[in-house]
Image (cartoon, helix red, strand yellow):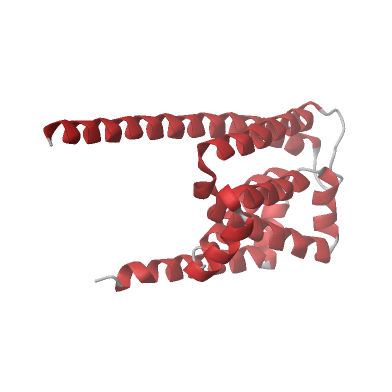
């Protein structure tokens, strides 16, 4: 009866490995990295997703070992935030396009960041999540504003119009992420209150 559920992490990990392999193909990389928008808002999120899927293969032993240094998900979220912040630096994008070693490092770091997010988000709880998003989302919006308003190209490899579009999307996504997280918080609070109400009702009946 439990066998199908035990197989789910393996299927997720296989899907993550397949996704990472597809993204590493030269034609796929060329297509996604031809546009600054696709480079940052398609390729990078897909690599994060692949890393998160790969993390599902981590067994209880590995998760317990990681939890020792990742109390409340803080270390994992800090590491993921550092990677995402680094990739917003225009020079890093230029180097990733010009240097194969930097491109490989970018892939590896995004996969690790995705795994760190997957393993850290739930243990973090609402308070640590709020701290993480309270730093990442304003930084994303500010970077987006700089990209949108800059009169010159910040990346040598991309056109000014592409840069401006990316900036607008970064601002919009930062706002959307904030709204979605607040909706999640509201739902969590409502569910907790309903659960507490049911428990109180059961106690009164007993």
Between 156 and 8, the one lying in front of the other is: 8
Taking the spot 49% from the left edge, 29% from the top edge, the residue there is 182
Q: Residue furthest left?
A: 205
Q: Residue furthest bottom?
A: 3
The answer to whether 198 appears left or right of 32 in the picture is left
Expressed as whole percent of the image width and height from the top left, the position of residue 195 reads 28, 36
* 146 shown above or below 122: above
Q: Quadrant of residue 177?
A: top right
Expressed as whole percent of the image width and height from the top left, the position of residue 134 reads 64, 32
Taking the spot 70% from the left edge, 37% from the top edge, the residue there is 166
Q: Quadrant of the C terminus?
A: top left
The answer to whether 183 appears left or right of 158 in the picture is left
Using the rendered image of the protein, determine whether residue 59 is visible from the camera's viewpoint: no
Taking the spot 86% from the left edge, 47% from the top edge, the residue there is 91
Expressed as whole percent of the image width and height from the top left, the position of residue 156 reads 87, 45
Q: Quadrant of the N terminus?
A: bottom left
Q: How many marks?
A: 0
* 14 shown above or below 120: below
The answer to whether 145 appears left or right of 69 in the picture is right
Expressed as whole percent of the image width and height from the top left, the position of residue 114 reads 60, 55
* 60 shown above or below 78: below
Using the rendered image of the protein, determine whether residue 107 is visible from the camera's viewpoint: yes
């Amino acid at each position: 009866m439990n066998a199908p559920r035990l197989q789910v992490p393996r299927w997720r990990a296989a899907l993550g490995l397949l996704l990472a392999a597809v993204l590493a193909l030269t034609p796929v990389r060329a297509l996604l990295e031809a546009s600054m928008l696709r480079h940052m808002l398609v390729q990078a999120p897909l690599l994060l997703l692949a890393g998160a899927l790969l993390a599902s293969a981590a067994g209880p032993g590995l998760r317990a070992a990681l939890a020792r240094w990742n109390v409340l998900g803080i270390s994992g979220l800090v590491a993921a935030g550092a990677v995402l912040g680094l990739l917003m630096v225009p020079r890093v994008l230029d180097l990733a396009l010009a240097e194969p070693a930097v491109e490989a490092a970018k892939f590896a770091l995004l996969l690790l960041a995705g795994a760190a997010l997957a393993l850290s988000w739930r243990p973090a709880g609402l308070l640590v999540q709020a701290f993480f998003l309270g730093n990442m989302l304003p930084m994303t919006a500010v970077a987006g504003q700089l990209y949108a308003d800059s009169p010159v190209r910040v990346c040598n490899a991309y056109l000014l119009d592409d840069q401006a579009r990316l900036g607008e999307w970064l601002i919009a996504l930062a706002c959307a992420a904030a709204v979605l997280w607040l909706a999640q918080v509201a739902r969590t609070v409502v569910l907790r209150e309903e659960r507490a109400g049911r428990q109180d009702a059961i106690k009164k009946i007993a």
